[in-house]
Each structure stands twice: as C-alpha cells, then as structure tokens.
Amino acid sequence: MRDLDIGQGIVVPASSLSASRSRSGGPGGQNVNKVETRVTIEADVDALPLSEEQKRLVRTRLAGRINRNGVLRVTSQAERSQILNRDRALARMEELLRDAIDVREVRRATRTPKREKQKRLNEKRRLAETKRLRSSRTDD
C-alpha cells in the first residue's frame, strides 16, 4: 500500500491504513466465486496526522462513511483485479480526505437589485398580457 498525499503538505502514512479483501459482487467471470477482489481500506480518524479542526471537518463531512468506532471506510469492487480495486479505493480515500479538509469560503448573503426585480415583474406582466390577449373572445 502507498502513502496518501491529501494536500496542504499532509501525508497519511500507509502504516495508519488497513486493507481487507472479500468476494466481490461485481464483474469477474469465473473468478467471481473464488477470488477475493473487493478491497476495503480503513483509516482511524483519530490516528490521522491532522489538526483537531481538520479531524472535526472529516467527522462531519464524511459522517456517512465513518462507523461508531471512528473508522473511515472506503470500498471498491468495480474492477476484476484486486490490485486495481485497491488503487481505486486508495485514490477515492485520498480524494474524500482532500475534499473534507478543504476550508470553504463562507457564502455572504446578497440581495437582488431593485432593477432586476423590476425587470422580472415587467416580464411577468408582458407575458400575462400576451396570454390574456390570446384568450379573449368577441361576443357576436
């Protein structure tokens, strides 16, 4: 297994990750019933070389992937090869951790300009008038 580079100078050593294999339900032909190609990579969030704030971000943003023991789990079974599935799972974990510790800019609430509101209302009036003219009937 390889180390994970999650950016900002942070490298998760391979020793803090564990991999387990199991039989896959995905593609595999005759192999599917006898070769364990599904790979699950696990990492204890508390053991990751992150600051407490970054660990908090990981726990909140990846809550669905972390079990009660605080272990982050990523599984791959898309490939027929165990090695390819392992590489895919490692890349996915790297991507998830990178996105989780990314500090996002706080969105500032803005107001719609008066001119834009007026333009929208004028357009609504114009369309309503067009429809009204289409449906009008003359009584004979």
Image: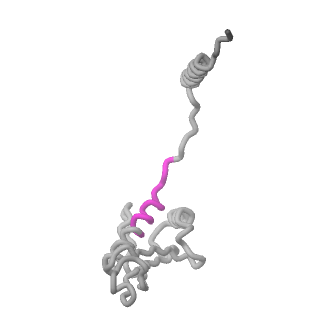
Is residue 65 shown to the viewer in this render?
yes
Q: Residue 128: x and y, percent? A: 60, 21
Q: Is residue 91 above or below residue 128?
A: below
How many marks overall?
0
Is residue 114 shown to the viewer in this render?
no
The reply, left or right, for residue 49 in relation to residue 107 is left
Q: Which residue, as the protein is rendered here, is positioned at the far front?
A: 140
Residue at (59%, 16%) from the top-left corner? 133
Q: Is residue 41 above or below residue 103?
A: below
Q: Residue 137: x and y, percent? A: 64, 15
Q: Quadrant of residue 6?
A: bottom left
Q: Residue 117: x and y, percent? A: 58, 25
Question: In the image shown, does 38 or 106 lie closer to the viewer?
Answer: 38
- Range covered by the magenta-colored residues: 93-105
Q: Residue 107: x and y, percent? A: 54, 44
Residue at (54%, 72%) from the top-left corner? 66
Q: Quadrant of residue 110?
A: top right
The secondary structure that dominates the magenta segment is: helix
Q: Quadrant of residue 116?
A: top right
Q: Which residue, as the protein is rendered here, is positioned at the far top?
A: 140
Q: Which quadrant, please, contains the N terminus?
A: bottom left
Q: How is the image coloured?
A: one colour
Residue 104, magenta (yes or no):
yes
Q: Which quadrant, please, contains the C terminus?
A: top right
Q: Which residue, as the protein is rendered here, is positioned at the far bottom?
A: 34
Residue at (40%, 80%) from the top-left corner? 39
Q: Is residue 137 above or below residue 109?
A: above
Residue at (44%, 60%) from the top-left corner? 99
Residue 23, magenta (yes or no):
no
Question: In the image shown, does 121 or 63 lie closer to the viewer?
Answer: 121
Question: In the image shown, does 108 or 20 lie closer to the viewer?
Answer: 20
